[in-house]
Image (cartoon, grey):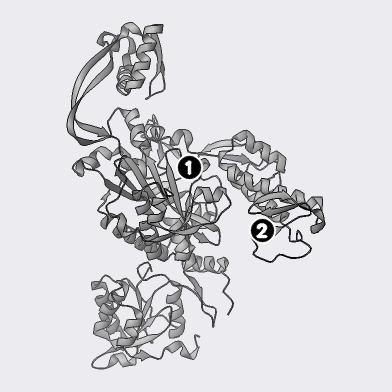
């Protein structure tokens, strides 16, 4: 039997029809990049988050916080988002439509590569499909991605075919370097490739930087500038000191936060995959920079992951499976803690229904690495849109804590006891008190902060400059103002200090989950179509399904109503979400309706349920097989199935099979 071709349009129709989610404000025409979750989507999303909470926060004993969405500008200035959190866009010069320039160029080049690929560049004889060394033109051969000259008489081809090979390689090189491009390079590429607006065909403007954060004013005066947070991480970083105290000053520890973030995407598209408001679940694992081992590493060390290292990407290689232990030993993954979370991410994704064979971990290349990261891997899921980043797992080093310390003067460090106390020579630059209010006035606090943040090397440089020039110019970190400080305004203080502890700024390992992208991947990987009647449904794991079971009376017979109430109360007592469907229509049609919203189990009340010891049937969604069991034990049975305490195969052995109603094929 031929493999079923995935039909995205059918899945999207089912999602919209059964209101898993839909575009926001649709009766007003909708707003791109904004989506509303319907009852099914809301329940499914809540189930995914609950599993995430249990898998990470509970099992790893993390500290959960819930921080403000509104973020003052100084916080995001310190983190680098105000200056760096931008994409370049171009505008249609006529319609003013905006396009993200790197995405526009990438789409255009991919079309060119496809158009320049040729099936006619074959040798006169020899060779076969799948060869790693294929002669490809009249003058050159391609071997492992390298082109070299060969005898023309061995090939059928023209000079044009050689040009195509060179063009394709040039285009592929551009794609790997696109993240490094500056505005002038983007503009030159647009001119060279004659790229126009994909909507109207009009000319495009020069590339412009566009900050992706939504800005706002906090308070009625409008004087406090702020943003809707672009990530949840900063709320954890600014609370590091209190979290460390709560953890009794000990490293390592992890904090987690689940909540919405906002990014003003230039051209949102692909449903939930690129939106302007989205739910994130982020973990910040604080660890000693000199010891990034993990106490539970052995638990996942033998797990096999599909890894796509940066070097393989540069060499034109492919992703391959490695044991996690092997990847750490080879320094492919930077450290045990990063690797541990990659393993836990894989286990979480497969637990909620992402297909194991459609998961890979791709390492960021240097030109795409975030400004704060020293190593980063994306857990990507294969969908009809291609490989989609669903989870980022980064070693953010000490960047964020250092930046917030520089901006506030508050030490965000932990203390590590020394085996023996040490004596340290300390040098400080002190500002003479008589100049603070008299000369610096309202900048006095910021001047003191500036000098308090200097390290020993910076102090030595400034002292030398004072001696040579008699004055220096400084830029205040808080407001960016430039001030001139003369030698007579300061004095240098030197003394010895006995230290019993060492102050360290922790490194941070950050797994960051995009719940919407994960949810879409789960839906696509579990979208099915019945072979006989082509009815569509979702085969979600019971833990993720919006409802765990349905109650279906065979008809509207009034004798069934008391049994429905008894079953519903019993299921509710066991916290089993369920849906009662006593609507008109055949039982087969109602089974199909419950399948569409991924309900894994269906209880049917029929006339055999009206006896002294009532029994009901239980139907399993994917196999459509049914068993009959006593009504008073059915709720516990469903609970055990949903908690994976028992399998459907076990149930079929323990209970008699029932011939299902849909065996008649009469759904009408």
Disc on res. 574: none
Q: How many marks?
A: 2
In the image: residue 30, left or right of residue 172: left
Query: Residue 606: horizontal and vertical position, in percent?
Result: 35, 89
Image vertical order of residue 254 relative to residue 124, above or below: above
Image vertical order of residue 499 relative to residue 578, above or below: above
- The answer, for residue 100, to whether it is visible in the render is no
- The answer, for residue 190, to whether it is visible in the render is yes
What residue do we see at 78% from left, 51% from top? 139
Q: Which of 258 and 473 is in front in this view?
A: 473
Which residue is outermost to the front? 151
Residue at mark 1: 369
Query: Residue 567: horizontal and vertical position, in percent?
Result: 27, 80
Q: Quadrant of residue 586?
A: bottom left
Give the CA distance from mark 1 to mark 2: 33 Å
What residue do we see at 69% from left, 45% from top? 196
What residue do we see at 24% from left, 77% from top? 570
Between marks 1 and 2 in the image, the one whose residue lies nearer the viewer = 2
């Amino acid at each position: 039997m031929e493999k079923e071709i995935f039909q995205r349009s059918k899945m999207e129709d089912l999602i919209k029809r059964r209101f898993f989610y839909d575009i926001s404000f649709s009766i007003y025409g909708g707003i791109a990049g904004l989506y509303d979750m319907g009852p099914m989507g809301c329940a499914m999303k809540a189930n995914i988050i609950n599993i995430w909470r249990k898998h990470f926060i509970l099992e790893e004993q993390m500290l959960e916080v819930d921080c403000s969405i509104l973020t003052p500008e100084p916080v995001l200035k310190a983190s680098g988002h105000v200056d760096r959190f931008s994409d370049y866009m171009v505008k249609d010069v006529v319609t003013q439509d905006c396009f993200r320039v790197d995405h526009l160029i990438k789409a255009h080049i991919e079309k060119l590569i496809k158009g320049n690929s040729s099936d006619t560049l074959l040798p006169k004889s020899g060779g076969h499909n799948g060869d790693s060394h294929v002669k490809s033109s009249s003058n050159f051969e391609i071997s492992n991605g390298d082109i070299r000259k060969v005898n023309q008489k061995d090939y059928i081809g023209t000079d044009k075919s050689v040009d195509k090979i060179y063009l394709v390689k040039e285009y592929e090189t551009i794609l790997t370097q696109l993240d490094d491009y500056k505005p002038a390079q983007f503009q030159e590429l647009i001119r060279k490739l004659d790229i126009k607006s994909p909507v109207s065909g009009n000319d495009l403007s020069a590339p412009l930087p566009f900050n992706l954060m939504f800005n706002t004013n906090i308070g009625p005066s409008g004087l406090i500038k702020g943003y809707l947070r672009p990530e949840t991480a900063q709320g954890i970083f600014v609370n590091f000191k209190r979290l460390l105290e709560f953890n009794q000053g000990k490293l390592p520890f992890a904090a987690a936060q689940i909540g919405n973030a906002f990014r003003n995407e230039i051209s949102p598209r692909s449903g939930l995959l690129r939106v302007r408001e989205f739910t994130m679940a982020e973990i910040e694992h604080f660890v000693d920079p000199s010891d990034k081992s993990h106490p539970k590493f052995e638990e996942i060390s033998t797990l096999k992951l599909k890894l796509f290292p940066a070097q393989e990407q540069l060499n034109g290689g492919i992703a391959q499976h490695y044991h996690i232990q092997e990847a750490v030993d080879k320094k492919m993954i930077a450290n045990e803690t990063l690797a541990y979370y990659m393993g836990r991410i894989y286990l979480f994704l497969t637990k909620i229904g992402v297909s194991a064979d459609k998961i890979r971990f791709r390492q960021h290349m240097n030109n795409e690495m975030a400004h704060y990261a020293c190593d980063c891997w994306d857990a990507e899921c294969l969908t009809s849109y291609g490989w989609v980043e669903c989870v980022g797992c980064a070693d953010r080093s000490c960047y964020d804590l250092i930046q917030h310390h520089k901006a506030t003067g508050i030490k965000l460090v932990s203390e590590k006891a020394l085996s023996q106390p040490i004596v340290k020579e300390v040098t400080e630059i002190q500002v003479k008190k008589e100049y603070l209010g008299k000369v610096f006035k309202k900048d006095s606090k910021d001047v003191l902060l500036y000098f308090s943040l200097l390290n020993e090397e910076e102090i030595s440089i400034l002292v030398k400059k004072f001696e040579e020039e008699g004055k220096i110019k400084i830029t205040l970190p808080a407001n960016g103002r430039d001030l001139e400080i003369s030698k007579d305004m300061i004095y240098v203080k030197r003394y010895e200090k006995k230290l019993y502890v060492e102050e360290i700024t922790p490194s941070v390992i950050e797994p960051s989950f995009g719940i919407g992208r994960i949810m879409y991947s789960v839906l696509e990987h579990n979208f099915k179509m019945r072979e006989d009647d082509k009815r569509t449904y979702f085969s979600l794991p019971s833990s993720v399904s919006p409802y765990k079971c349905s109650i279906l009376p065979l008809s509207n017979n009034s004798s069934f109503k008391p049994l429905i109430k008894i079953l519903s109360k019993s299921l509710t007592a066991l916290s089993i979400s369920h849906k009662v469907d006593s609507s008109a229509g055949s039982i087969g049609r109602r089974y199909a309706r419950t399948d569409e919203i991924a309900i894994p189990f269906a209880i049917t009340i029929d006339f055999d349920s009206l006896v002294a010891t009532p029994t009901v049937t239980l139907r399993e969604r994917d196999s459509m097989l049914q068993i009959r069991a006593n009504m008073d034990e059915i709720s516990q049975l469903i609970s055990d199935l949903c908690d994976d305490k028992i399998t459907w195969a076990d149930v079929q052995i323990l209970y008699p099979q029932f011939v299902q109603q849909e065996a008649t094929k009469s759904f009408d």
